[in-house]
Amino acid sequence: MEKASLKPGAEKVLVALSGGSSSRAMLQLLYEYNREEPHKKSKKQVFKSVEVCFIDESTIVGGEKDTVENVLQMAQKLNYNIMRIPLEDIFSPDYTTSGIYDNVIKISTDGVHRKPSQELFHSIQQQSENTSNRDKLKALLDGASKTTVKEDFYCFLKLSLLLQYAQRKDCTRLFLGDSSTRLAIKTISLTSKGRGFSLPLEIAGETQWFGDTKIMRPMKDMLSKEIGLYNQFLHLDSVFIPSLTTMLPPKASIERLTEDFIVGLERDYPSTVSTVARTAAKLKPSELMQDEKCIICLMPRQPNTKSWQDRFTVANTNSAAYTSMPTCSSSFSDGCCNVTSSECSKPVKRANTDISDLLCYGCRVNMRDVGDVTFPPYVAEKVNEQRQEELRRQIEVFLLSDDEEEQGEIGKEVHIQKR
Amino acid sequence: MSLKVKLSFSGGMELLFNNNKSAEVKIPASINPPNPTNMQDLIFWIRDNLLKERPGLFISENTVRPGILVLINETDWELEGELDYEIKDGDDIVFISTLHGG
């Protein structure tokens, strides 16, 4: 961790604690690092305060009864505030930017199921109150048939929760417990999943991509083996959190297979992990990265991934031909808006438009595997934000032209009056 | 003659052993006579006698699966000769899975 970049005593930190060995060790190290030491000259703590957040997945993956209690105690022993957020709370309006947004987004494919190129229709609707958040989460995960996709969703939901919570608590830093081993695995698995564009952010020791909250990975230079030994010798008990791939064979998901691969290589060639992790650490975020976030994973998306994907995949020619202009709202240059405005508004069905443009490549690939699913409010909110942004841009054009027209008409009127 | 050994499993390993985190076991001093019992023998012995599920998640290529940390009396087993280490009476052997989700 670069101490230089820290203003002592000014920042609040949120630690993401899963209870597993890596985050357990991270919490301990942070505690040691941040402790007020009487013999030091400056008695200021490095961080103003430390919040701990535990995302409870037990409703989905199960686990032992006392797991939650054990995790809460880990933080309480160090006198830290700990907040337990059940993963299904992602469906609660509390975890949206505005804090009150209560609509969900239903995404459905255009009938051609599991084709490489497809339009994704969506409708934003009021959440039904009859189903519990837990069932909604289950439905979302069950909507994906591949474990890889499920794991991805898992990851995004967790990150989204953590970021929202960090913002609510005014934490300027979010600590994630990715170890060097995990980052090496992520490097390979994210690349295979088509997330190379956002890769530099997802493995960076420090990133500002999420604005006010800096994500940091203090454990990035430690091997999982070192962490295991550290915990063993300090008698730090970590809990075991089952994951989606627990007890499954290595080929259950890309993530799992990559883990097997990297860890296996590490045994025979002991510097594999650090070589991969250090090589990946040299990656710099692309300059093409703008403010455009994928609505699901919140990572940067490249514009035009869709047309790009269309070009190299064999798809139904019909759908490929029409995808470039799914609705009038997508762009002005595609000729639709040359017609008069009354005709133009007809084909636009705002409730059911194609949102595949708002997804990054990785998420688009994932959506191939998904039927009809309902995403939590934060996604719906993002869609709304982006649509409004788009609308504003369009209105700007109109405003300009309106002004000109008005001026012209006034000019005419004046002319007539003069005559 | 038999050896008393303390075995511990953590990090998800316990799932393979019916959620038992530790076990005190007695193993023959020489599983493969005339050689004294070494780690290799112990690992197979665990597989045959203690393991409840999925041997593939414990053993691969005649040794423990990569990603599983083995400590012999609080020392990394790589320093003790790994599979060739000869088990002594009263040894404390710990298996820790560092893999995601065990």
Image (tube, rainbow, N blue to C red):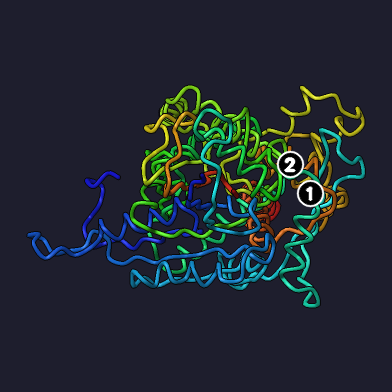
Secondary structure state at the residue bearing disc 1:
loop
Q: Image quadrant of residue B76?
A: top left
Instruction: Work out whether mark 1 precedes mark 2 in sequence or the reverse, and give the earlier one.
Output: 1
Q: How crowded is mark 1: few (under 14 residues within 10 Å), some or many (20 or more)?
A: many
Residue A402 seen from this side: no
Q: In which quarter of the image is the N terminus of chain A?
A: top left
Instruction: Name the one closer to the observer, A97 or A53.
Output: A53
Q: How far is mark 1 from mark 2, CA to CA?
A: 8 Å
Which amino acid type is shown beneath numbered disc 1?
Answer: Ala
Residue A242 x/y as whole percent? 62, 55
Query: Are the residues flagged by discs 1 and 2 from a single subunit?
Result: yes
Label drawn at residue A324: none
Residue A417 x/y as whole percent? 68, 56
Q: Image quadrant of residue A134?
A: bottom right
Residue A217 seen from this side: yes
Residue A23 x/y as whole percent? 44, 54
Chain where mark 1 sits: A
Observer-side mark, 1 or 2, equals 1
Instruction: Name the one closer to the observer, B14 or A22.
Output: B14
Chain where mark 2 sits: A
Q: Furthest residue to the bottom? A: A130
The reply to whether discs 1 and 2 touch (Cβ–Cβ < 8 Å) is yes
Rendered residue at 44%/60% (across/down): A237
Which amino acid type is shown beneath numbered disc 2?
Answer: Asn
The residue identified by callout 2 is A366
Q: In this view, does A232 lie above or below A271?
A: below
Rendered residue at 87%/49% (across/down): A347
